[in-house]
Amino acid sequence: MSAKKKIEIESEENKEDPSEKQGQGSTGEASTGSAGGQYAPSGTDQSSDSVKALEEKLEAATKEAQENYDRLLRVSADFENFKKRTAREMEDYRKFAIQSLVKDLLPVIDNLELAIKSASESVRDRDSHLLDGVDLTRKEILKVLEKYNVKQIEALGQNFDPNFHEAVMREESDQHAENTVTNELQKGYLMHDRLIRPAMVVVAAPKKDAGE
């Protein structure tokens, strides 16, 4: 082989391919740039999403706690009202448990008072002891009723009160003011200030002139 041809072969082997250098350089730079560009924004987005999720959970938990507190307040108020209502009902039951018994006894007292009134109008000596006995029985019954806060309504001579009196007739009178109770036909009774029975009464009316 000639010396000239040998030199040409060695020259071709030592030549560098500029495309290989360029490819290697661009590959390294792209790799470095790509890695750096993806890392920073990825971490920031994840951190922001985590904070937002925690804030939403905190807001939901706070709302739920407030709703539970409001519900507790309503339940507590309802329970207090229930206790007060039950206490009132028990107190009323205790006061008026014998109301039916009292109503059944009232006619007995009426008959005793009627007997006393009839006997006193034409009393004889031999009947006086019987009259005293009947009157004593009446007083004893009334005394028992007073233990249970049962009392008679004062009507005779009082102004007519529709809350406690029942007018069965009107009587002309110039001795009493109008609407004054002049006669009591049947006693009325209260129990703990509750009306058991109104008094049946006669009420005064203005006396008319003879010419009318």
Image (cartoon, rainbow, N blue to C red):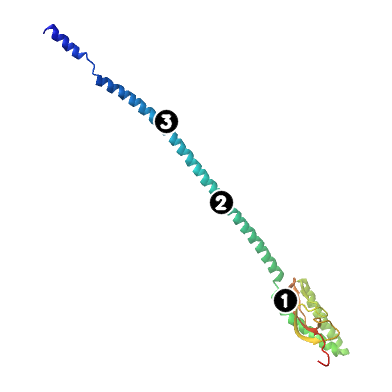
Q: CA distance from mark 3 to mark 2?
A: 43 Å
Q: Quadrant of residue 123?
A: bottom right
Q: Which mark is residue 40?
A: 3
Q: Residue furthest left?
A: 1
Q: Nearer the viewer, mark 1 or mark 2?
A: 2
- Asked whether 157 or 177 is in front, the reply is 177
Q: Residue furthest top?
A: 3
Q: Earlier in the sequence, mark 3 or mark 2?
A: 3
As drawn, 68 above or below 166: above
Q: Residue furthest right?
A: 125
The amino acid beneath tag 3 is Ala
Secondary structure under the numbered disc 3 in the rendered image: helix
Secondary structure under the numbered disc 2 in the rendered image: helix
Q: Which mark is residue 68?
A: 2
As drawn, 144 above or below 70: below
Q: Quadrant of residue 13?
A: top left
Classed neighbour count for the residue bearing mark 3: other residues with Cα under 10 Å, few (<14), some (14–19), many (≥20): few
Q: Position of residue 50 (x, y in %)?
A: 46, 38
> Is residue 83 visible in this depiction of the protein?
yes
Classed neighbour count for the residue bearing mark 2: other residues with Cα under 10 Å, few (<14), some (14–19), many (≥20): few
Dot 1 corresponds to which residue?
196
